[in-house]
Amino acid sequence: MSITVPFLDLRVADQAERQDLLAAVDTVLQHGRIVLGPEVAQFEARLASRIGRGHAVGVNSGTDALVLAIRAMGYASGDEIITTPLSFIATANAIAINGLEPVFADIGEDLCLDPSSIEALITPRTRAIIPVHWAGRACDMDAIMAIANRHGLDVIEDCAQAFGATFRGRSVGTFGRVGCFSMNCMKTLASLGEAGAVLTDDENVAKHLRALRYNGLGEAGTCIQVSHNGRLDTVQAAMLMVRLDRIDSVLARRNAVASFYDRALAGIVGTPPRDELRADAFYTYTILTPRRDELQAFLAERGIESRVQHLPLMPEQPAHAHRKAAFPNARRMLSLSLCIPASEKVDDQQMHYVAATIGEFFGRRPNAV
C-alpha cells in the first residue's frame, strides 16, 4: 500500500471537533451579531490571557495585524523599519503600505533575524525593528530588545508563524511594544479562513487599533485616521475559541513529530537547533541540505509534499528589490532549506515514512528511535 504525506491537511476529520465548530457557528447564526459580536470580545480576552498581555485586538488577518500595528505607532512617511529578509512577503508589504521603508538585515544559522546584523543599518530615520519568529522559533529577544532600548526603537514582533513559541518561558508577542499574530487556516492556532490579532500592554495603542480596524472610526463615530475595514469576523472568533481549547494538544503533537525527526535525521541532514532558551511551536520543520532541490524532487516522486519557505527572499521580490538590503547568509541558508510535513495531522506511519525516504535518498538508514 502506497503512502502519501501532504504538507498540510486542512480537513476537519475529527468528528468531535467538527461538531464543536458547527455548534459555535450555530450560536452566532442564532444571535445574529455577525459583525463584532460577543465572541470577538470573548476571544480577545482569552487570547490576551493566554499570551500574557493586557489587550488583544482581533483583526481579519495576520497581514492586517502588521499593517494596523505599524499604523498605530504614528511613524512618518519615509521612516525606516529594520526586519529580516526571510519571511512571507506580508512583513515587508505592511511596512511599505504605511509609507515606510523596509530595511533588510540578515539572518543567523537558526533562520531568524541575526541581532549582530542590525546596528550597522540603524540611521536617524530608523524607528523600529520587526523580528519575525520564523517557522515557530523565537528570535533572540534578549539581544534584539537590548539594541532597541539602546537606540530608542520600537519592537513590533511578527508572530505570524509562532503561536505557542516561547523565549525564556515568555510567549512571543510579549517582548515588543506590540505582537502581531496570524491565525489563518495554516497556522498552529488556525481559523477556518483568515484571522489575526495584535497584542499589547499599551491601552492607548489598543484603543487606537480598535478604531483603525474599523475604517479609522473612533468612539464618537468620527474618522480619526484614514484606515480600512480590518475587523475580525464573529464566526471566525467563535471557531477560534474552539481551536484554542485544543491548542495544547496541537502543539504537543507537533513537538512530538519534530522530536522524532530530530533523532531520526541527526547526521543525515541539518535539523532545527534546540536550546534551553526557546520552546519552538514548529509551524514548519525545516531541514538543511546542499542537495535541497534533488531531495525535494525525490520526496515528491514518493508522495511526500515539501515546501521551500519563502522563495524568493523579500528583498529579491520585484516590488522590494530596490530597497536597502544586506543578507548574504539569508541567500545561503535559503538555498539549503526544505520544510517537510510536521503538522499535528502527520501520523506515526507517515513520519516514519518521511524519515525513511530521506534516509534512502542519502543512502542512509534513519537513526533508531
Image: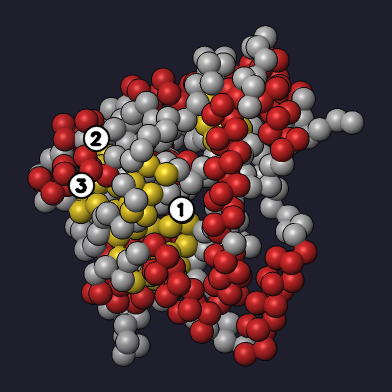
Which residue corresponds to mark 1?
A: 164
Which residue corresponds to mark 2?
A: 115
Q: Amino acid at mark 1?
A: Gly
Label 3 or label 2, whichever comes before in sequence order: 2
Q: Amino acid at mark 3?
A: Met
Between circles 2 and 1, the one closer to the viewer is: 1
Q: CA distance from mark 3 to mark 2?
A: 10 Å
Residue 142 occupies which quadrant of the picture? top left
Q: CA distance from mark 3 to mark 1?
A: 20 Å
Against 241, is 96 above or below?
above
Q: Position of residue 327 (x, y in %)?
A: 32, 27
Q: Position of residue 108 (x, y in %)?
A: 33, 28
Question: Is 6 left, or right, of 153 in this rendering?
Answer: right
Dot 3: element: helix
What residue sits 45% from the left and 43% below the top? 280
Asked whether the beta carbons under mark 3 and mark 1 sit within 8 Å of each other, the answer is no
Which residue corresponds to mark 3?
A: 145
Residue 364 occupies which quadrant of the picture? top right
